[in-house]
Amino acid sequence: MDEWSLWLTSEKHLAPSTIRSYQGSLRLFSEFLIDGRYGWSVACEDAFGTHPVASCHEWNTIAHLNDYEGRPEARPFTREEIQRFLDYADDQVDRAVRAKRKGALAAYRDATLFKVIYGWGLRRTETSKLDVVDFGRNAKAPQFGRYGTLNVRYGKAKKGQPPRRRNVLSVMDWAVDAVADYVENVRPRFGCEDHPALWVTERGGRVKPAEINARFVAYRDALKLPKALTVHSARHSYVTHLTEDGVDRRFLQQQVGHENDSSTAIYTHVSDDFMNTMLHRALAPVLTPFPANKDR
């Protein structure tokens, strides 16, 4: 058990949460074997002269001591950083148009793609597999037209299970305007009317996750933003910034497709200004002076 755990850590370089999951599966299996209600211990004693014992204990497995065990350098964009990034993506469209380069359509597509990732809190793979028909109306938000909700059909799957689907409600009007303009005015110019994909290439294919990542890295490095920022950071930013704006945590949990609130909490890295505001509100009743007592 010790050697196996060490191999997972030092040679496979797996995350602590992954190793704990493996150890937990082994622990459950060994507990099943030694449970007296099933009779396996007696059967093994009769057949082999020995019986199974528990192999996973508190002293040889990873304890769950921290709420967050991801890479400490992983973080969301600040509001200023995400604005700079999206502005830079838009600038690449203008530059390509002025230079009359062939890549103007692709630049516009990618600028809109990044706005959708941030505007709906999506993963990279979820974004690449979107189809035009995945957008739909929301009766509670008629102002968004046919872009009031987004049906994510290829959400992150559990091991051995199919992709999980979820509906993400539109909340950012500027993002809706961006995707509507792309679908109605830019995408038709790719000449792929019969292709279902929302993000199409100039050769008539579907944009792949690796291509999204490559364009993101190029923009990030051009802006000299921290290399700790990844495509997934935009998803973190979606949760963080809406939390700062007062959006309900339960609503955000459903929006991003988390089963547990603890997962959503990991995504939330609110700014110091927000924390100071919350502190001020929390202390307001304490700091409020008592009314003057006229009798004193």
Image: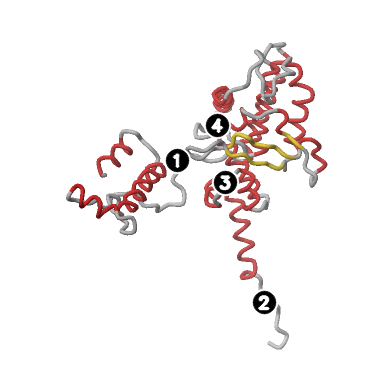
Looking at the image, do the residues carrying marks 2 and 3 touch, with CB atoms under 8 Å apart? no
Q: Which of marks 1 and 3 precedes in the sequence? A: 1
Relative vertical location of residue 89 with respect to residue 24 in this rendering, above or below = above
Which corner quadrant of the image does residue 165 belong to? top right
Q: Which residue is mark 1?
A: 71
Q: Which of marks 4 and 1 precedes in the sequence? A: 1
Q: Which residue is mark 4?
A: 225
* Crowd band around label 1 with a 10 angstrom C-alpha radius: few (<14), some (14–19), many (20+): few
Mark whose residue sits in front, 1 or 2: 1
Q: For mark 1, give the secondary structure.
A: loop
Q: Residue at x 21, y 48 (%)?
A: 47
Mark whose residue sits in front, 2 or 4: 4
Which corner quadrant of the image does residue 290 belong to? bottom right
Q: For mark 4, give the secondary structure.
A: loop
Q: Which of marks 4 and 2 precedes in the sequence? A: 4
Q: How is the image coloured?
A: secondary structure
Residue placed most toward the observer, 163 or 146: 163
Q: Which residue is mark 3?
A: 258
